[in-house]
Amino acid sequence: MDIQLNDVWSNVESFRSGAFCVHQTHSAEIVPMHKHNKDQLIYTEGGVVHIMTEGNTWYLPARHYIWLPAGMLHSTKGHASVVMRSIYFEPENDGNLFYAQPGIYAVNDLLLEMIYQTSHWVGHISPENTAAYHFVKAMRALLPQLSREKMMFNLPSPKDARLFPVVDYLQKHINEPLKVAEIAKRFGFSERSLERLFISDIKISCINYLRTLRMISALELLSNSKLTISEIASKVGYESSPTFSNTFQQIIGMRPKMYARHGG
């Protein structure tokens, strides 16, 4: 069932208790910055969705979900074929830090079945709808136990102007076998000073930024192209397909071929 976004936002904000479910095909347009007074879980099928928050861009791949705490400004960008399943929860002051921080997590078989169960419900789930209401509350309560490891599918935006040309260069030359020492030399840094600048400014090392950027690009290519795994490995700067596949499994949790079969 298709619901217009303006209707979704007004309806989500209108209820104080219960939950709200939306299952719809994402448009190719960028959804502008907005926020909700509810916690939000987003699960996607059919491609990678970009979720922009203040100072961060998150990349939500297939078989994963993102948790957005209530009040967090965010914008989304997807493809016309992407199905987005959003569940909005009433915030609860239970003191669990999991709910207070955004993050992307892998979806196991149990959570996947629970998400699919919510597809039977569209719109507000009130406490009067006893079975659905308690099901969604149980789902929310289980998330910290079912989501042990936060996935690094986000790239912080640098604030230090010295990193602007470095990050731009990495994004434009991702198909090359880049080395941190060579990048540092190109921009007048020592390797050590460049790594320090990355860590102090965006809390991630240059090598990990580059690796994350490569994996995100690989996710996009797996979702939106007919290239072979070997061709994708080359396009994201890997000279060895096995090395690319091993790195992909380490970060994404599955081999590239399996990711593609899961509907990436």
Image: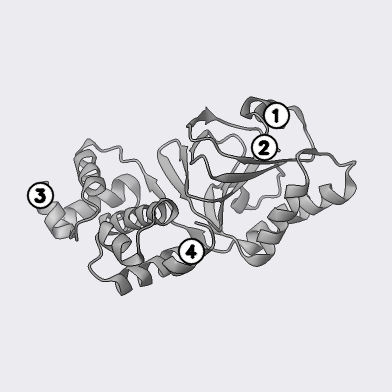
Q: Quadrant of the N terminus?
A: top right
Residue 34 on image: x %, y %? 55, 29
- Asked if the residue at tag 1 contacts the one at tag 2, i.e. Cβ–Cβ closer than 8 Å, the answer is yes
Q: Nearer the viewer, mark 4 or mark 1?
A: 4
**Residue labelled with disc 2:** 38
Residue occupying the point 77% across, 33% down:
16
| Distance between the alpha carbons at the discs numbered 2 and 1 | 8 Å
Q: Mark 3 falls on what kind of element?
A: helix
**Residue labelled with disc 4:** 259
Q: Earlier in the sequence, mark 4 or mark 1?
A: 1
Q: Going by the image, does 171 lie left or right of 87?
A: left
Q: Residue furthest front?
A: 226
Q: Which mark is residue 68?
A: none
Q: Earlier in the sequence, mark 1 or mark 3?
A: 1
Q: Earlier in the sequence, mark 2 or mark 1?
A: 1
**Residue labelled with disc 1:** 13
